[in-house]
């Protein structure tokens, strides 16, 4: 991929919303850099898009590692530039606060909260220098409503919401947009197979979320949707 405008870096691209977003951005002409820990799934994504005569670049990345994120951002900005980072990588566990192990809590916070913070931290100097950029964070309606058996997940997403709300005010002067997408139940592998089988018809698809994401990124002018709540017509499960 040559160095061009509209380079979009998407974390958590191996499945779900991230994978759908990589496809949707590529189809609309953006230059996509897709990242995830699972290299085989990234290869599969690239092969699927090649059948549509579309090309993306794939760079494995574990967002929970600040050192790894720093290396990936350096490569992207050196080789291509960057217009947008989409913080989509996420993990969860459906357990009560009492049942969650310390390791599970650590993994969730490190990936969902600190991973996104690391990505923002390392792309920010580049965006400030070019006085332009978009940061899109995939959150959850867990920041708006209480869901039991999701305490660590809610903490990670609520923490990111607070962090990026402050960030937005700090970077307005650099023409950097910060957009928080807050989707409700979406049919992705984060849900158990039994829940997906039982309730998928009431869930949104990853493609639904991806299209809204692309639409918000491509908006021109002085308007920006800073917070976008997305729910199925039927509401929460």
Image (spheres, helix red, strand yellow):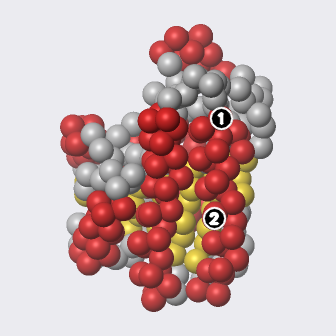
On the image, the x and y values in percent for residue 100 come to: 55, 28
Q: Is residue 164 above or below residue 80?
A: above
On the image, the x and y values in percent for residue 19 come to: 40, 42
In the picture of the structure, the residue carrying the numbered disc 2 is 164
Relative side of 53 to 149, left or right: left
On the image, the x and y values in percent for residue 35 come to: 33, 52
Q: Is residue 199 above or below residue 4?
A: above
Quadrant including the C terminus: top right
Relative side of 127 to 141, left or right: left
- Quarter of the image for residue 236 reads top right
Circle number at residue 176? none
Residue 159 or residue 167, whichever sits in front: 159
In the picture of the structure, the residue carrying the numbered disc 1 is 151
State the CA–CA distance, disc 1 to disc 2.
Answer: 20 Å
Q: Is residue 215 visible?
A: no
Residue 162 or residue 208, whichever sits in front: 162
- Residue at 69% from the left image edge and 70% from the top image edge: 166
**Circle 2 SS class:** helix
**Circle 1 SS class:** helix
- Residue at 60% from the left image edge and 38% from the top image edge: 152
């Amino acid at each position: 991929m040559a160095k061009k405008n509209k380079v979009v870096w998407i974390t958590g691209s191996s499945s779900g919303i991230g994978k759908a977003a990589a496809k949707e951005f590529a189809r609309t002409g953006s230059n996509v850099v897709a990242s995830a820990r699972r290299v085989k799934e990234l290869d599969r994504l690239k092969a699927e898009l090649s059948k549509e005569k579309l090309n993306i670049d794939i760079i494995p990345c574990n967002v929970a590692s600040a050192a790894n994120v720093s290396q990936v951002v350096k490569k992207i900005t050196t080789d291509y530039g960057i217009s947008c980072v989409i913080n989509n990588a996420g993990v969860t566990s459906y357990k009560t606060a009492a049942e969650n192990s310390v390791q599970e809590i650590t993994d969730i916070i490190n990936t969902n909260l600190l991973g996104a913070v690391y990505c923002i931290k390392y792309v920010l100097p580049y965006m400030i220098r070019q006085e332009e950029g978009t940061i899109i964070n995939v959150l959850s309606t867990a920041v708006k409503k209480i869901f039991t058996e999701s305490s660590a997940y809610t903490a990670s997403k609520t923490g990111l919401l607070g962090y990026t709300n402050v960030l937005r005010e700090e970077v307005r002067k650099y023409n950097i947009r910060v957009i928080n997408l807050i989707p409700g139940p979406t049919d992705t592998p984060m849900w158990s197979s039994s829940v997906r089988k039982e309730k998928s018809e009431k869930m949104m698809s990853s493609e639904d979320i991806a299209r809204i994401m692309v639409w918000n990124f491509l908006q021109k002018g002085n308007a920006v949707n800073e917070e976008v709540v997305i729910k199925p017509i039927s509401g929460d499960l």
